[in-house]
C-alpha cells in the first residue's frame, strides 16, 4: 500500500480464513494479527463493521484513522461504480 503522494508505502499481505458472500471477510495478516469485516444493512444502505488487532508500533488513534481512510476510499469507489 502507498500514499497517493508517494510519501510512504508498505507491504500488506494476509490469508483469508473465512469469506461469506455479502456478509463477512476474515483474514490474518503476515504478522499474525487478525481482521474481521462484517457487512449488513437493508434497502439502499450497507453497514460495514471492521475489527482489527492493533500493532504495537503506532498509536491506536493513528491506526484507527488509517483503517477509516481505507473504508472511506472504498465507499467512494463503490458509490462511483
Image (tube, rainbow, N blue to C red):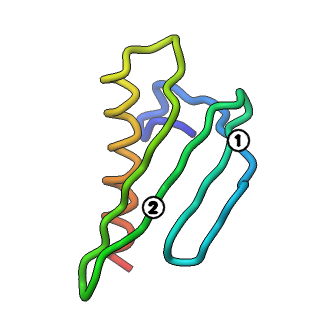
Q: Which residue is drawn at 46% across and 25% down?
A: 7
| Furthest-bottom residue in this view | 43
| Furthest-left residue in this view | 44
Q: Quadrant location of residue 26?
A: bottom right
Q: Which residue is drawn at 37% across and 71% down?
A: 40
| Residue position marked by numbered label 2 in the rendering | 38
Residue at mark 2 to residue at mark 1: CA–CA distance: 19 Å
Foreground tag (2 vs 1): 2
Q: Residue at x 71, y 31 (%)?
A: 32
Q: What element carries label 2?
A: strand
Please state, as top left, top right, bottom left or bottom right, where the N terminus lies in the image: top right
- Residue nearest the viewer, comparing 62 with 1: 62
Q: Is residue 34 left or right of residue 32?
A: left
**In the rendered structure, which disc, 2 or 1, sits on the residue that comes first in sequence?**
1
Q: Where is residue 20 in the image (x, y as percent from the top left)?
A: 61, 72
Question: Is residue 62 depicted above or below 33 in this figure?
Answer: above
Q: Quadrant location of residue 16?
A: bottom right
Are there few (<14), some (14-19), or many (20+) residues within 10 Å of tag 2?
some
Q: In this view, does 2 lie to the left or right of 72?
A: right
| Residue position marked by numbered label 1 in the rendering | 13
Q: In this view, does 60 lie to the left or right of 3?
A: left
Q: Where is residue 17 in the image (x, y as percent from the top left)?
A: 72, 55
Please state, as top left, top right, bottom left or bottom right, where the C terminus lies in the image: bottom left
Amino acid at each position: 500500500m502507498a500514499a497517493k503522494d508517494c510519501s510512504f508505502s508498505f507491504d500488506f499481505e494476509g490469508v483469508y480464513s473465512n469469506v461469506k458472500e455479502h456478509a463477512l471477510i476474515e483474514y490474518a495478516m503476515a504478522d499474525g494479527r487478525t481482521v474481521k469485516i462484517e457487512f449488513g444493512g437493508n434497502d439502499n444502505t450497507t453497514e460495514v463493521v471492521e475489527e482489527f488487532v492493533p500493532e504495537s508500533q503506532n498509536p491506536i488513534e493513528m491506526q484507527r484513522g488509517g483503517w477509516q481512510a481505507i473504508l472511506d476510499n472504498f465507499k467512494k469507489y463503490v458509490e462511483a461504480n
